[in-house]
Image (cartoon, rainbow, N blue to C red):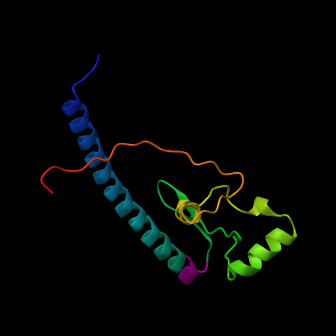
Amino acid sequence: MAKKLDELIDKMFMLREAKRGLDSQLKDVKDQLSNLEQQLLVRFNEVGTDYARGSFASASITESVVPQIDDWGQVAEWVMENDAIYLLHRRISSGPWKELRDAGTDVPGIEPYTKTAISLRRLGD
């Protein structure tokens, strides 16, 4: 059943506003979790343990080694010399690609795609 444009627009607006409220709540929860994690790490260190439990859950300290790039130039050179492109994420940064295209440079293997979306703005702003 087809709805009127104004009804669809208003419904989309209301859902977007609801999502923004939930995103804000999610950010607050993530911040609280991060704060509690830091507090737990300090307390674990103070009492000299890496495991503890409460009434609902247990917690333990885990460690994992993850990459942190200090010099992108060295990394890029090594990746190219060793044909190790698999180390990188498979996506193109839109901004720099658009700049190259606007300057007349075509990057092989990339086809422009026109993504269509709805721009929604609050009335009265």
Location of residue 118 by image quarter: top left
- Magenta stretch bounds: 44-48
Q: Position of residue 29 (x, y in %)?
A: 38, 60
Query: Is residue 21 toward the left or the right of residue 75 in the image?
Result: left
Relative to 68, residue 59 above or below: above
Location of residue 30 by image quarter: bottom left
Query: Nearest the camera: 59 or 3?
Result: 3
Q: Position of residue 94 (x, y in %)?
A: 54, 59
Q: Please identify the residue farthest to the left as the structure is shown.
A: 124
Residue drawn at 51 percent across, 56 percent down: 57
Relative to 76, residue 112 above or below: above
Q: Position of residue 65 (x, y in %)?
A: 71, 71
Q: Position of residue 19 (x, y in %)?
A: 32, 48
Tag count in the figure? 0
Query: Nearest the camera: 121 or 51?
Result: 121
Indicate the quadrant containing the C terminus: top left, top right, bottom left or bottom right. Answer: bottom left
- In the image, is residue 46 part of the stretch drawn in magenta? yes
